[in-house]
Image (cartoon, rainbow, N blue to C red):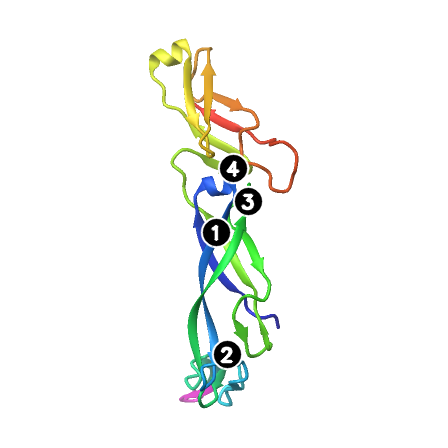
Amino acid sequence: SKTKPLVEVIELNLEDFYCGKTLIINIEKEKTIDSNGKVDNNGFKTCKECDGNGIKNIVRRMGPMVQQMQVQCEKCGAKGFRLKSGYKIEPFREKIEIKIEKGSPNEHQIVLNGQGNYDYKTKSYGDLVIVLKEKEHKTFQRRGYDLYTSLDINIIEALSGVETYIKHLDKRELYIRTEEIIENGMVKVVKYEGMPDRKSTRLNSSHQIISY
């Protein structure tokens, strides 16, 4: 079976997804050390009580009926292993550098092979999986690669048109001008000002959609 990955969720602003960013993050991991304080992955032994499964099958008799149940192994704390004498598992923090690509989607996963915790069953280190979670933005909402936003206008602006600026995710001020009469629910498309496409080297082909 494959070694279980270590999963870390990182919350980011929409600006980080738009501009890209390099982050240094602290990951909480585990290491097994011997009596001398040195890292040693040979300190595990399979729990004989549950044969390394972490759970046990027990049989209970209730009158004329026999019921078979699965319960967690109390000897190993449902882990499937116990530590040899002198060994202990110690938590520690490790600094990891990750690069957020421009246009990365919400809940995008960055997989760092072999940088997770050690698994005594597979005799190998699992992967470290960084999940990028997008925070809610006060101005923009992402749908695919397009960006959606809304403008509140008064009755005079609705009848005579509107001129304004919208601050983009990279701090640029986009000039917005609508000359015709604006009806409720009307939309304006600002071409090529959506999210960048991280898989393409071409010019941005996504748009910004403004609703009134």
Which secondary structure dominates the residues rendered in magenta? Answer: strand
On the image, the x and y values in percent for residue 86 come to 44, 88
Q: Residues within 10 Å of mark 2 (few under 14, many from 20)?
A: some
Q: The N terminus lies in which quarter of the figure?
A: bottom right
**Total marks in image:** 4
- Name the amino acid type tagged 3: Ser
Which of the two marks, 3 or 2, is nearer to us in this view?
2
Which disc, if any, is residue 143?
Answer: 4
N-terminal-most mark, 3 or 2:
2
Q: CA distance from mark 3 to mark 4?
A: 13 Å
Q: Which mark is residue 104?
A: 3
The amino acid type found where label 4 is placed reads Arg
Which comes before the other along the chain, label 3 or label 1? Answer: 1
Do we see residue 70 in this rendering? yes
Give the extent of the magenta segment.
57-66
- Separation of disc 4 and disc 2 at Cα? 47 Å
Q: Which residue is mark 1?
A: 23
Amino acid at the residue labelled 2: Val
Q: Are marks 3 and 1 in contact (CB under 8 Å)?
A: no
- Residue at 57% over, 65% down: 127
- Please name the residue shown 41% across and 39% down the image: 137
- Name the element at disc 2: loop
Q: Return the residue at label 2.
A: 39
* Farthest top residue in view: 160
Q: CA distance from mark 3 to mark 2?
A: 36 Å
Nearest to the observer: residue 26 or residue 136: 26
Residue 14 versus residue 43 in the image, above or below: above
Q: CA distance from mark 4 to mark 1?
A: 25 Å
Quadrant where the C terminus is found in the figure: top left
Viewer-proximal residue, 2 or 113?
113
